[in-house]
Image (cartoon, grey):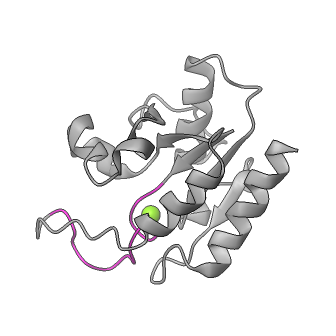
Amino acid sequence: MILFLDFDGVLHPEGEDHILNGGADFCFLPRLEALLREFPHVKIVISSSWREQLLYQSLLKPFSSDIRARILGATPHSGFGLPPPYRKREGEILAWLQLHDAVDEPWVALDDAYWQFDHCKDHLVVCSSFVGFDDKACAELRARFEGASR
Ligand SMILES: [Mg+2]
């Protein structure tokens, strides 16, 4: 099981400029990491647009070391994703799966940008942008993880 992980609107509410003010907030990361620890078979790929602006090592910094060890990489930059009719983010995710010979791997995307998913909407656990990874999203993600481990 692979979790494609967005940052803004997921690990913290959207709306503040987290990069420019230098303050990585990540207030919901502990909640996500606690869930991930219950499902050690789940690997992580970063799909956030932060990957286009920060070095890979900087992207990994907010994560605890045990969770960081489970991060496989980041999706390819825009332009290397699948072309339309796929939406940008789902195209980048599918491109990652193809590049890593993992098209048959179960996956879920945790993202607030529901409009970035069309063909793969059934893989999406959506967060509300101005709320982030709340109890509801956490319960839904847990159900996906449980479904994949059956
Ligand atoms: Mg987002």
Residue closest to the eye, 118 or 36:
36
Quadrant location of the N terminus in the rendered image: top right
x and y, in percent, of residue 90 in the image: 60, 45
Quadrant location of the C terminus in the rendered image: top right
Residue closest to the eye, 65 or 121:
65
Q: Residue at x 18, y 62 (%)?
A: 19
Magenta stretch bounds: 6-19
Would you say residue 97 sits in the magenta stretch? no
Horizontal side, residue 88 vs residue 143: left or right: left
Say if residue 119 shows up in the picture.
Answer: yes
Q: Residue at x 49, y 58 (%)?
A: 33
The total of numbered circles placed on residues is 0
Say above or below: 50 vs 71.
Answer: below
Q: Is the stretch drawn in magenta largely helix, strand or loop? A: loop
Q: Residue at x 55, y 18 (%)?
A: 99
- Which corner quadrant of the image does residue 16 belong to? bottom left
x and y, in percent, of residue 70 in the image: 48, 36
